[in-house]
Amino acid sequence: MPRQAIHSYLNRHGFETLQPKAVLFDMDGVLFDSMPAHARSWASVCTRFGLHISAEEAYMNEGRTAASTINLLTERQWGRKATSQEIEQIYAEKCKAFNTCPEAPKMPGAEELLTKVKASGLQILVVTGSGQLSLLERLESHYPEFFSADRIVSSKDVHHGKPHPEPYLKGLEKAGVRPWEAFVVENAPLGVRAGVAAGIFTIAVNTGPLPDKALADEGADLIYPSMRSLAENWETLLAACRS
Ligand code: MG
């Protein structure tokens, strides 16, 4: 399966080889099991402001900046974009709600995968739409051997959030590698779209409630059911790149 996926990736982009030197990890739903709390926080805060977002919608729109998510809802329900004051207010409330949720646990299998990636000599970076300090700090405190501030691309580093390719292009730049020298690991459809648009081999891990089709439709090169499963298949994947 990886071999076939690599073959079609190379054909599609006109690249000759896939030689991973860096792995660009998304954070929510990949390194932390934080998506249920995000979805719940969005739903409860939006209701308070007279807006509606279903859990499925929260997952489908994961990766968007807060402003873009809020505008999506106000355009649909109020027929206009939100004012910057409304965005600020709703987002502040959403962050407050999220921060009262129990701490999101590390995603099962993530540490195992990071250990293998590091042992393989590849660089490890995080590319996240989040700008929440609490989560970025948690990254350094929960995965201290793997991340440092200069290995993180957050919403503060980009003009356009996912699904725009800019965050992943920034990640490539930080790592000093080209698209065929990296993997993206993503759980969200829009994150997959961003990775694919950046020309990077994009691995989806379906850690949420959406069907695999939602990830396949955005062009995911490979789909695994969990981070643990990707960790178990890491050697096979690297071997497929070398053959
Ligand atoms: Mg995610």
Image (spheres, grey):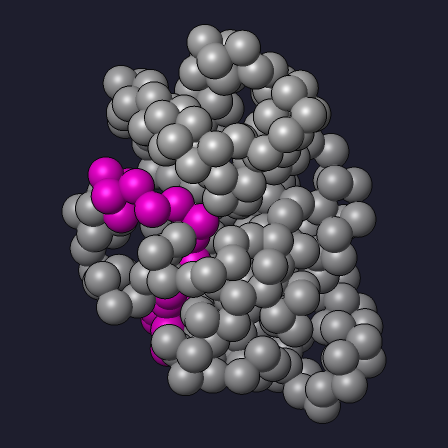
In-front residue for pair 236/169 = 169
Horizontal relation, residue 166 to residue 243: left or right: left
For the N terminus, give its image quadrant.
Answer: bottom right
Residue 12 sits inside the magenta stretch: no
Question: Where residue 224 sits in the image (x, y, percent)?
Answer: 64, 48
Q: Name the image quarter holding residue 100.
A: top left
Residue appearing at x 72%, y 86% in the figure: 15
Quadrant housing the C terminus: bottom right
Q: Is 203 left or right of 156, judged from the image as shown?
A: right
Q: Name above or below for residue 79 compared with residue 184.
A: above
- 31, above or below 210, in the image: below
The residue under the point 76% across, 79% down is 13
Q: Is residue 70 left or right of residue 189?
A: left
Total numbered labels placed on residues in the image: 0
- Stretch of the chain drawn in magenta: 113-136
Which residue appears at 23% of the width and 39% of the height?
Answer: 134
Residue plotted at (25% across, 68% down) = 150
- The image quadrant that residue 242 belongs to is bottom right
Relative to residue 184, is residue 211 drawn left or right? right
